[in-house]
Image: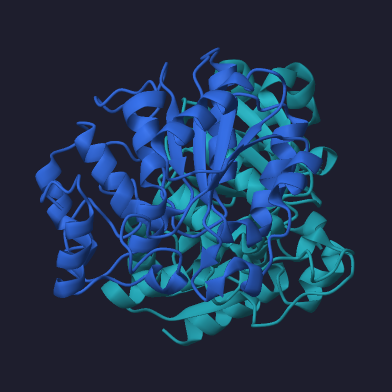
């Protein structure tokens, strides 16, 4: 998808593929006959909207829309905007994201709406780690603990990279686990965030902590660009597309490649 | 001076428009269980206390974190809630523009952004809090409806109307005690201008607190033999283009009056409408590219030229240019 339009964000998408696949194909109860209010369903919000290629791919393969539509990604007149949006009414997307730092607040609001509606399903929010530098994230973190938003699991794609370089060099996040704990959250660490079994186990542990008066954070340690050797562990593939040779090389490394990218 | 004038509208009581919002919100909450309130540490200032008391399970204190408040409100619409956010106009717009743009306007969420203490009439707190750019910022956002009612009764009616309307709304009101000159329990039609006084020589398009000044100006002009039409533009967007063009077709010139910068305000919208359809002389009563300052509301309106006397002068200038 990213190659076809020669723009997008392949690195982070590859790094958290296992997680989003685990959510949609195993963990969440969700309905491909899309209802934006999602009553009786688990909801997912992607705050780091630049990972859109991955989300669209998972939504299509979950039956929200035709896989063939993925070929329109980032092109004119497409429902698959560069960053997720509701304007074109793409099934599966409940709110726009892309400008970072807003998704946790949105997810908390949706979780409170579920509480008022006596809907016992969960809300998942995924954020980037670089995104933790946005102040609004910490406003939301404070609010969630104060208001006991315990029907929410926020997952941070902890790959240690951002556009300008490693997070440790750009703006050190220091001890994220301790920070969230100090804000009143339960924190689960998923150390092997690119291992499907570990991802599922982490999600199960996180789910077990919901409903106990505290919001839950899942710190998902991942490798940016996982599965493609020349993209792994570097910020250089944050926002650029592979050329023809790189694409062929990358697809050759991924056993599951279906050729319908 | 007002006492000696033959005013077309009169008042027996003054009240702040923010109280119209507070009372309207309480009534909207009684009518619709999906109405929820959020406030960023200004419950008293926004007059949201009665709603909070009657519906504690539907009221959420956000603390001093306006960006988060906008995101929470956007999220709450998913599941059918109708969130009303409350803080000062400055913190409801400029401080959280990107949150509104992405999570509310672009995402077309049913959030009601309710903004008090707008404009110079905030008074003594000074320019940090006296936002004069909010209408412009909000009207530029696609999907956003922008409303600026003129008194307590109209603000209450507008609050009830936006609870029934589906889509993002910016509702602007203020702090000063102000004449209540429009009827109680009036019907508020979003996007429909209200011709309050018929006239033939000049049209005064006014919004917010300045509608009262326009009513006073009409009486002053009438004493001098000038017939002014007064139109209450409570909805800045969508603008009632038909009413504006019909009136200016008759009078041939107009004045726009608002507690806002020239740039981005109601006058801007009217000028655009006229230049696209039927150019006509227009004079502006508003703030001319400056910040406000501390003072009483009346002192500030006088110093910055936002009162009946200045509307009269502007009307005469407009008529001369015909």
In percent of width and height, residue B314 lies at 59, 78
From the viewer's side, name the closer residue of B245 and A3: A3
Instruction: Left or right? Give the position of A229 relative to B13.
Output: left
Seen at 85% across and 63% down, the residue is B123
Q: Is residue A57 above or below residue B273?
A: above
The quarter holding residue A81 reads bottom left
From the viewer's side, name the closer residue of B274 and A197: A197
* Residue B180 at least partly seen: no
Q: Is residue B211 above or below residue A4?
A: above
* Residue A48 at least partly seen: yes
Seen at 49% across and 86% down, the residue is B320
Instruction: Left or right? Give the position of B56 relative to A208.
Output: right
* Colour that chain B carries in the picture: cyan
* Colour that chain A carries in the picture: blue
Quadrant where the N terminus of chain A is found in the figure: bottom left
The quarter holding residue B51 reads top right
Seen at 43% across and 81% down, the residue is B281
In percent of width and height, residue A183 lies at 78, 41
In percent of width and height, residue A33 lies at 24, 24
């Amino acid at each position: 998808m990213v190659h076809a339009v020669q723009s997008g964000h392949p690195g982070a998408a590859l790094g958290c593929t296992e997680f989003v696949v685990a959510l949609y194909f195993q963990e969440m109860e969700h309905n491909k006959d899309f209802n934006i209010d999602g009553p009786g369903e688990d909801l997912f919000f992607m705050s780091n909207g630049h990972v859109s290629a991955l989300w669209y791919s998972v939504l299509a393969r979950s039956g929200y829309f035709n896989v063939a539509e993925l070929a329109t990604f980032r092109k004119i007149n497409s429902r698959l905007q560069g960053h997720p949006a509701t304007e074109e009414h793409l099934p599966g997307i409940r709110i726009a994201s892309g400008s970072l730092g807003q998704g946790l607040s949105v997810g908390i609001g949706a979780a409170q709406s579920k509480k008022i509606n006596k809907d016992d399903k969960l809300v998942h929010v995924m954020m980037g780690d670089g995104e933790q530098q946005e102040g609004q994230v910490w406003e939301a973190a404070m609010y969630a603990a104060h208001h006991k938003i315990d029907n929410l699991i926020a997952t941070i794609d902890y790959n240690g990279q951002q556009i300008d370089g490693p997070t440790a060099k750009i703006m050190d996040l220091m001890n994220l686990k301790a920070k969230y704990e100090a804000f009143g959250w339960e924190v689960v660490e998923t150390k092997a965030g690119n291992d499907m079994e570990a991802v599922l186990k982490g999600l199960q542990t996180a789910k077990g902590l919901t409903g106990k008066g505290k919001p839950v954070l899942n710190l998902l340690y991942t490798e940016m660009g996982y599965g493609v050797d020349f993209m792994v562990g570097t910020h250089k593939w944050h926002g650029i597309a592979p050329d023809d040779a790189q694409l062929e090389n990358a697809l050759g490394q991924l056993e599951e490649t279906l050729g319908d990218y | 001076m007002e006492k000696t004038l033959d005013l077309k509208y009169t008042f027996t009581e003054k009240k702040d428009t923010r109280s119209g919002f507070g009372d309207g919100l309480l009534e909207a909450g009684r009518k619709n269980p999906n109405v929820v309130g959020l406030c960023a540490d200004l419950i008293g200032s926004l007059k949201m206390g009665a709603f909070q008391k009657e519906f504690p399970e539907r009221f959420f204190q956000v603390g001093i974190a306006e960006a988060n408040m906008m995101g929470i409100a956007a999220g709450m619409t998913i599941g059918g809630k109708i969130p009303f956010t409350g803080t000062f106009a400055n913190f409801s717009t400029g401080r959280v523009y990107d949150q509104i743009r992405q999570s509310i306007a672009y995402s077309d969420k049913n959030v009601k952004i309710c903004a008090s203490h707008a404009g110079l009439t905030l008074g003594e707190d000074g320019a940090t809090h006296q936002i004069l750019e909010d209408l412009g910022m909000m009207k530029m956002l696609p999907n956003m409806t922008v409303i600026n009612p003129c008194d307590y009764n109209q603000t209450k009616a507008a609050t009830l109307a936006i609870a029934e309307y589906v889509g993002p709304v910016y509702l602007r009101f203020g702090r000063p005690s102000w004449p209540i000159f429009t009827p109680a329990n009036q019907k508020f039609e979003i996007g429909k201008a209200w011709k309050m006084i018929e006239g033939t020589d000049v049209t005064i398009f006014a919004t917010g607190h300045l509608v009262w000044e326009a009513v006073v100006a009409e009486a002053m002009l009438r004493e001098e033999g000038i017939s002014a039409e007064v139109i209450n533009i409570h909805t800045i967007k969508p603008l009632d283009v038909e009413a504006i063009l019909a009136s200016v077709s008759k009078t041939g010139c107009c004045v726009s009056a608002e507690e806002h910068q020239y740039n981005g305000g109601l006058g801007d919208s009217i000028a655009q409408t006229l230049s696209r359809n039927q150019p006509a002389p227009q004079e502006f009563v508003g703030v001319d590219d400056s910040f406000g300052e501390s003072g009483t509301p009346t002192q500030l309106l006088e110093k910055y030229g936002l009162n009946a006397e200045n509307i009269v002068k502007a009307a005469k200038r407009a008529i001369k240019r015909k």
